[in-house]
Image (cartoon, rainbow, N blue to C red):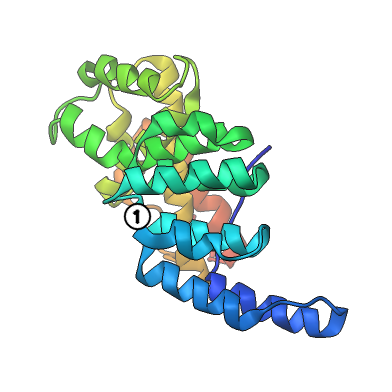
Amino acid sequence: MSRVVLRRSPLNALAAAVALGACGGQTVDAQQVEAALRAAQEKPAAAAEICGALPSGRWRAECVLSAVERLAAHQPAIAEGLCAQLEEDEGGVDAQECWFQLAERSLDVALCVRAGSFVEDCRIHVWTARVPTLAAAQVSEGAPLEPALPGLALAAAEHGFVPDDPRPWTALYRHLHHAAGAPTPGVCAGLPEEHQQWCTRAGVGVYRDQLQFLRDSNHFPCGGAPAAVAAPAGAPYRAAYAELAVQVGCPTGAL
């Protein structure tokens, strides 16, 4: 199961549920739930008692999750107890989401094994969150990447990724391209062939994102692709630029 969850404020979700309940005949003790949600956000360490006073189901889970989000970074042991209790009382997707949130926010990939059907998404989220620190520790500024690959591969394995899984490397290379700012094919120089492909795809993806933002904000540069992608290694970047330039309607002489 792929996890695509955009969590909104539980208080906003409560307001929506009350509105729906007014139309659909469902009853929600809005005052009790709102008081518990606010209390859990203000005193997350006491969430076991606060949230436990709510009936089992959606709102108890929302209460626990809102507390876990606040506890995960600085009091992970308390947050772990909340997830374990939610797992025991409720189970299902809410408990899996709890472990996911705790793992991601505490950067503890070992907790991902309890995220159920979200375990793979959990690993990549934790890895992506840790990439800046890992990259800074393994790659000296301006130094070639190739010597750092064994250490980064070991870190990826510790996060549960097999050697030929492109996902951790894509996240790493996207970070490095973002850090470079402008499109820089040279980031991928000297890498083994497979890594060259992953690195180039990541770089072109970042460049395409930049161009799409400029397109959507009416600032697309019709003057041509930057000089940094003029070398042969820049061909995929130039192709991405040409594709977006055609969509924008740039004069053909600028392509």
Residue found at x 40% / y 28%:
110
Q: Which quadrant of the rendered structure holds the N terminus?
A: top right
Residue found at x 19% / y 25%:
144
User: 52 or 73: nearer the eye?
Assistant: 52
Q: State the residue position of label 1.
A: 71
Q: Residue 24: name its quadrant.
A: bottom right
User: 73 or 209: nearer the eye?
Assistant: 73
Q: Left or right: where does residue 178 sit relative to residue 250?
A: left
Q: Position of residue 145 (x, y in %)?
A: 24, 25
From what the image shows, is residue 67 above or below residue 159? below
User: 179 or 161: nearer the eye?
Assistant: 161
Q: Residue 153: name its quadrant.
A: top left
Q: Left or right: where does residue 138 sit relative to residue 55?
A: left
Q: Position of residue 75 (x, y in %)?
A: 29, 50
Residue found at x 41% / y 69%:
41
Amino acid type, callout 1: Leu
Q: Residue 214: name its quadrant.
A: bottom left
Q: Position of residue 148 (x, y in %)?
A: 22, 20
Residue 202 seen: yes
Circle 1 Cα neighbour tier, 10 Å, few/some/many (<14 / 14–19 / ≥20):
many
Label 1: which secondary element: helix
Residue found at x 64% / y 34%:
117
